[in-house]
Image (cartoon, grey):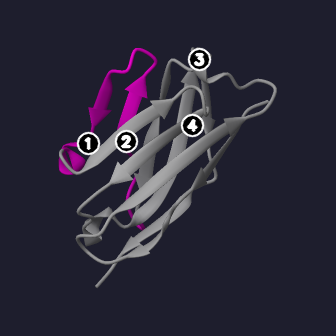
Amino acid sequence: QVQLVESGGGLVRPGESLKLSCAGSGSGFSILLMDLMGWYRQAPGNEREEVATVFSNGIANYLNSVKGRFTISRNNAKRTVDLQMNNLKPEDTAVYYCYARRGSRRYWGQGIQVTVSP
């Protein structure tokens, strides 16, 4: 059994920052065995999109619109994957989901709201 729990969301103004954190737990969770972890988001009326992912070897990928503003990091000791979001824009408003993959298995968190509004 694997649980992913997100934290750190909220309401901010354009230009401000937020840090999302995803903590993994459960008898079936071992961050070292997760070959990919990351963050997706879904805004109202839109499909869920991949924001940032990091492989177990540390290689990260980013959605073009967040490159240079968001940074994903994986902390194996804390069993977390974090997303530092700087210079937030209204178009970043969405529910953000933590994601983990181990082989053919996929795991999702419940999601956390991020709202960027003046």
Q: Nearer the viewer, residue 118 or 96?
A: 118
Q: Earlier in the sequence, mark 4 or mark 2?
A: 2
Residue 74: image x %, image y %? 47, 31
28 part of magenta stretch: no
Label placed on residue 32: 3
Image marks 3 and 4: residues in contact by CB distance under 8 Å? no
Q: Earlier in the sequence, mark 3 or mark 4?
A: 3
Q: Secondary structure at mark 2?
A: strand
Q: CA distance from mark 4 to mark 1?
A: 20 Å
Name the residue at 27% across, 66% down: 91
- Which image quarter holds the C terminus? bottom left
**Residue matched to label 4:** 80
Q: Amino acid at mark 3?
A: Leu
Going from N to C along the chain, the mark reached first, 3 or 2, is 3
Q: Which amino acid is tagged 1?
A: Leu
Tell me if mark 2 has few (under 14), some (14-19) or many (20+) residues whose alpha carbon lies within 10 angstroms of its own.
some
In the image, is 16 to the left or to the right of 23? left
Q: Which mark is first along the chain, 2 or 1?
A: 2
- Indicate the amino acid at tag 2: Glu
User: Residue 86 occupies which quadrant of the picture?
Assistant: bottom left
Q: Looking at the image, is 22 positioned above or below residue 89?
A: above
Q: Nearer the viewer, mark 4 or mark 2?
A: 4
- Mark closer to the observer (4, 1): 4
- The residue beneath circle 2 is 50
- Region rendered in magenta: 44-67
Frontmost residue, 71 versus 3: 71
